[in-house]
Every structure is written in structure tokens, then in C-alpha cells.
Image: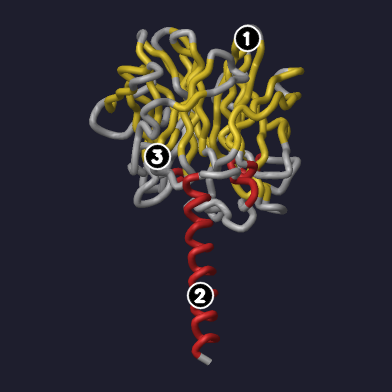
């Protein structure tokens, strides 16, 4: 009897240890993560019950943007989506090409509760026409970080369910894209944001818990990518770790947006000037003393805003896609 009790206690301890060890492996990805990913799903406070939609802000700088008086926001909602039954749309990224504006964004499909990448088009940046879903994978996609480099358009969406950072290239811009490959693997990478700066590519990704920001760098867009020496460069700070839009250069300085995920996900966006960035150092400071976009308290963006992508349109004027719920 005593022997049976000892064996039973031993089995219980083994089961408890296995569970805690498994969660530790998932958080710290200390051996090939894909082995156990189906048993320990991602830990995120992301909810599909929100009613995100997309608006347009204007202003005199990327840090001074507001709702314009000449349009009624939001300019795009789930009701505009015609090829799937959409729950919401969010994470807009904006590109001006020739005489047209193109907007890329997440479309949350009600049928399978999965994000796809959608496209809308505008002649003036204010009046938008939805076109179609342009990228649909067997897993969730969001945050379609689109950019132009050496004559080609590329797109890096968030694909955390696939434990990857994926690179796409336009073969017939803006509607047809081909998958070039994974540039990172093995973790729930959140909101990957990339920029070419000082002859290197820099990739900023957040942990799926929204608390740590990591940087990777490479000589070429398709890698190989190397972890920054100081990772995580933002540690245990859910207010500013997760990306909130495009990384960009302005007045010969480098900036990033960061969304506030505490006490609730996606409540507002701050801007940071990156004052030092190389393979061994990273420093940044906040722009101003308040967020750039934030919950308005009423209307379409009453509860939160979390993505911003400004484009300069000349004569000291900026136009930016934003989202809110």
C-alpha cells in the first residue's frame, strides 16, 4: 500500500513538472517549438469580440495628427467587405503609388475566426473603395507591413499562429503576391516591423505577451537574421513594447510607434525617437509627453486605437491611416 502511494505521488509530480516545463519551453523556446505548439497555444489578450474599423487622420507632422473636419470616420468598416463575412477590420498600412492610395489591412473572417489581408483603394486618401482579399493562408494573418524596396513591393504580415515571420513579394501589385519564405521561425512573433537603416535591415518584433520587444538585423532582406545583443531591448513593459505602426525616418531621425497594451490591449499609440541603433546598442526616447492617437471616449474609436501609418502628401501635410474600436 505504501509503495502504491509513493508511486502515485511520483506520477503526480512528474505530470506537474511536465506541465510547468512545457509552459517554460513555450515561453523561452529552448528547443524546437513546433513539437509542442499544439499543446500550449499562444497566450494573448487579443480578442475577436472587438469591433475595429479604419479611419483617416491628417496633420502637420507624423506626431500631430487628428480627425479631419472634411470627412466622416470611419472610412472603412466590416460592412464594406464584400468577399467574406467580416467581423472587423484593423491594422491598416498605407502606400501612395503614382496617383492612387492603397490600404492594406486585416480582415477578421467570421466564418473561421481567422484574419486575412484585404486591400482598399482611393484617389484622394479620403474616399475609399474596398477591392478584395489578397492574401489568405490556413492560419491567422494581420498587421500587413507593406513597403517598397529597389523597384519592388514587399509585405510582412503578422503570422504568429504559424510561428513565423513571413515575407511576400508583389508579382502584380497591389493584388497578387507570392510567398518568398520565412525570415524567422519558432515563436509567436507579434507585429513584425522592418526598416532598412545604415546599410542593414532591422526587424522589430514583440513577444505575444505584449511585454518584450526584440530586434533582429541582417545584411539582406531574406536573411540570415541575427538577434540583437541587448534583446529584449524593451523588457517587461506592456505599455510600449508592441509595435503600433511603421518604423520611419523623419528629418534624418528614426522613429517607431508603440501601442499601449495595459491595462487593455490596443488603447493608444506612443511615438519614440530611436536615438541609437547598431548591432551592439539601442537607445530611444519618447516623442512629447502624451500618446499620438488614443481612445476618444465616444464614437467609432471610443475604446482604443492601435495602428498608425502616416504618409507625407506635400505642402507640409500628412495623411495617416488609423484604426479604432
Residue nearer the viewer, 235 or 7: 7
Residue 288 rendering spot, x and y as whole percentages: 25, 26
Specify whether 163 is left or right of 26: right
Mark with earlier residue (2, 3): 2
Using the image, tell me which numbered label, if any, was put on residue 212. Answer: 3
Identity of the residue drawn at 55% across and 39% down = 90
Q: Name the secondary structure under disc 1.
A: loop
297 w.r.t. 246: above or below: below
Q: Identify the residue at the far left of this view.
A: 289
Task: Categorize mark 2 by other alpha carbons within 10 Å: few (<14), some (14-19), many (20+).
Answer: few
Using the image, tell me which numbered label, if any, was put on residue 231. Answer: none
Picture quadrant of residue 241: top left
Picture quadrant of residue 160: top right
Residue nearer the viewer, 139 or 67: 139
Q: CA distance from mark 3 to mark 1?
A: 38 Å
Specify whether 23 is left or right of 302: right
Task: Categorize mark 3 by other alpha carbons within 10 Å: few (<14), some (14-19), many (20+).
Answer: many
Q: Nearer the viewer, mark 3 or mark 1?
A: 3
Specify whether 35 is left or right of 29: right
Residue 108 seen from this side: no
279 w.r.t. 163: above or below: above
Q: CA distance from mark 2 to mark 3?
A: 36 Å
Q: Nearer the viewer, mark 1 or mark 2?
A: 2
Residue nearer the viewer, 188 or 80: 188
Residue 324 rendering spot, x and y as whole percentages: 47, 41
Residue 63 seen from this side: yes
Using the image, tell me which numbered label, if any, was put on residue 98. Answer: 1
Circle 2 sits on which residue?
A: 10
**Looking at the image, do the residues carrying marks 3 and 1 touch, with CB atoms under 8 Å apart?**
no
Q: Identify the residue at the far front of this view.
A: 3
Residue 20 rendering spot, x and y as whole percentages: 48, 61
Mark with earlier residue (1, 2): 2
Amino acid at each position: 500500500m505504501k509503495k502504491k502511494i509513493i508511486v502515485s505521488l511520483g506520477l503526480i509530480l512528474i505530470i506537474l513538472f511536465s506541465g510547468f516545463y512545457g509552459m517554460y519551453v513555450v515561453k523561452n523556446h529552448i528547443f524546437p517549438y513546433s513539437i509542442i505548439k499544439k499543446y500550449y497555444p499562444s497566450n494573448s489578450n487579443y480578442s475577436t469580440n472587438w469591433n475595429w474599423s479604419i479611419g483617416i487622420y491628417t496633420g502637420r507632422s507624423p506626431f500631430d495628427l487628428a480627425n479631419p473636419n472634411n470627412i466622416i470616420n470611419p472610412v472603412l468598416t466590416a460592412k464594406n467587405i464584400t468577399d467574406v463575412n467580416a467581423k472587423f477590420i484593423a491594422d491598416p498600412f498605407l502606400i501612395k503609388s503614382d496617383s492612387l492610395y492603397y490600404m492594406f489591412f486585416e480582415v477578421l473572417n467570421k466564418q473561421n475566426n481567422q484574419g486575412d489581408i484585404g486591400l482598399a483603394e482611393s484617389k484622394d486618401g479620403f474616399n475609399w473603395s474596398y477591392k478584395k482579399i489578397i492574401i489568405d493562408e490556413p492560419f491567422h494573418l494581420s498587421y500587413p507591413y507593406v513597403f517598397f524596396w529597389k523597384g519592388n513591393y514587399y509585405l510582412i504580415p503578422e503570422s504568429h499562429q504559424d510561428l513565423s515571420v513571413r515575407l511576400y513579394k508583389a508579382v502584380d501589385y497591389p493584388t497578387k503576391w507570392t510567398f518568398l519564405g520565412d525570415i524567422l521561425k519558432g515563436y509567436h512573433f507579434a507585429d513584425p516591423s522592418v526598416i532598412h537603416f545604415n546599410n542593414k535591415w532591422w526587424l522589430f518584433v514583440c513577444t505575444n505577451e505584449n511585454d518584450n520587444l526584440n530586434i533582429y538585423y541582417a545584411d539582406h532582406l531574406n536573411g540570415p537574421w541575427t538577434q540583437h545583443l541587448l534583446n529584449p531591448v524593451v523588457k517587461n513593459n506592456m505599455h510600449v513594447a508592441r509595435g503600433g505602426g511603421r518604423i520611419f525616418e523623419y528629418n534624418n531621425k528614426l522613429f517607431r510607434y508603440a501601442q499601449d497594451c495595459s491595462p487593455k490591449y490596443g488603447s493608444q499609440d506612443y511615438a519614440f525617437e530611436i536615438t541609437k541603433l547598431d548591432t551592439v546598442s539601442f537607445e530611444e526616447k519618447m516623442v512629447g509627453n502624451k500618446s499620438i492617437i488614443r481612445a476618444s471616449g465616444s464614437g467609432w474609436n471610443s475604446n482604443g486605437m492601435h495602428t498608425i501609418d502616416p504618409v507625407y502628401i506635400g505642402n507640409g501635410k500628412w495623411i495617416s491611416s488609423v484604426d479604432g474600436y
